[in-house]
Amino acid sequence: MLAKMMSLFLLGLVRFLTGAQARWYGCPPKAEQRIYFANHQSHADLVLIWAALPEELRSITRPIAARDYWTKTPFRQWITTAVFNAVYVERQGPAQTAKAEPAPAAVPAPALDALAAAVAEADQAAAGGPDPAPDPVPEPTPEALRAALSPDDPLVPLVRALESGDSIVIFPEGTRGHGEEPQPFKSGLYRLAQMFPQVVLVPTWIHNVQRVMPKGEYVPVPILCSVTFGAPVALEDGEERRPFLDRARRAVIALREV
């Protein structure tokens, strides 16, 4: 009951301060499993998206929250757990403690080419001709990709939320940006698209929220904000990581002008 009352209070407060105007451009507000991926300029981003969603989508959508910030006080932790049902993530991956092996001395490229050609010629002569081309290695299935996750992989909490049927809100930049455009996207969105091809990927643009709660400030300023939801994107067959992430980032930026 207390969480429900706080939810209603925050919803009214956020909508009073920002308007929390939702603009559905390219996709309707539909109760299907989705990954909303958005630009990130303020800790209030997750609150604004939560408030902009209609009630039937809020109940099935879990924003991600940086554990180090949102669990710093008992009240923040209670809000993100009881009200937003957030997924906590670590902003930094596990520390790399292993020392790098010293690199072996480089071998000149012409010498390597000559050696490879000599070995190939000897193999063919001994076997009576070239070997048939090996069968192509099949792509790992989404289930295999999820099973191969290391327990300390930062994506594990998001994967568990998606496996349970929830929708999530993520910020692919990984940290807050300070420019007009989002920073290059990190690989998390690509990996989630590989592991959950059935989940709809919705680009999202958050406008003006950084002016409501500038970095280092604690008192919000009433300013009209909006959240624009765009047409879904999908990972294409054989699409590489960086082209997909750049395409997803462009889909978010394009919503700025809508």
Image (spheres, rainbow, N blue to C red):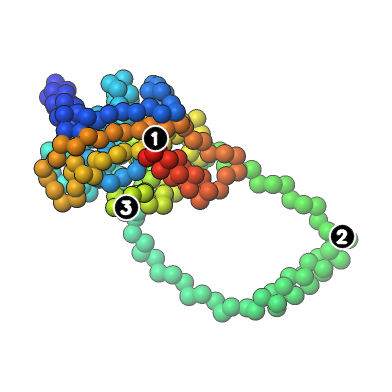
From the top left corner, tell me how far across and down residue 193 is, in percent: 48, 39
The residue positioned 41% from the left and 23% from the top of the image is: 28
| x, y percent for residue 98 | 39, 65
Query: Where 243 sits versus 122, above or below?
Result: above
Please name the residue that numbered disc 1 is placed on: 258
User: Considering the numbered disc 3 on the image, is that residue within a helix, a strand or a loop?
Assistant: loop
* Position of the N terminus by quadrant: top left
Task: Pinpoint residue 211: horizontal percent, then vertical percent.
Answer: 21, 44
Local packing at callout 1 (Cα closer than 10 Å; few below 14, some 14-19, many 20+) is few
**Eyeballing the image, is 116 above or below 208?**
below
Q: Nearer the viewer, residue 69 or 127?
A: 69
- Quarter of the image where the C terminus is located: top left
Q: Secondary structure at mark 1?
A: loop
Around disc 3, counting alpha carbons within 10 Å, would you say few (fewer than 14), some (14 to 19), or many (20 or more)? few
Image mark for residue 129: 2
Q: Is residue 65 left or right of residue 106?
A: left
State left or right for residue 232 relative to residue 175: right
> Which amino acid does the dot numbered 3 rest on?
Gly
Question: As drawn, which residue projects farthest toward the right?
Answer: 128
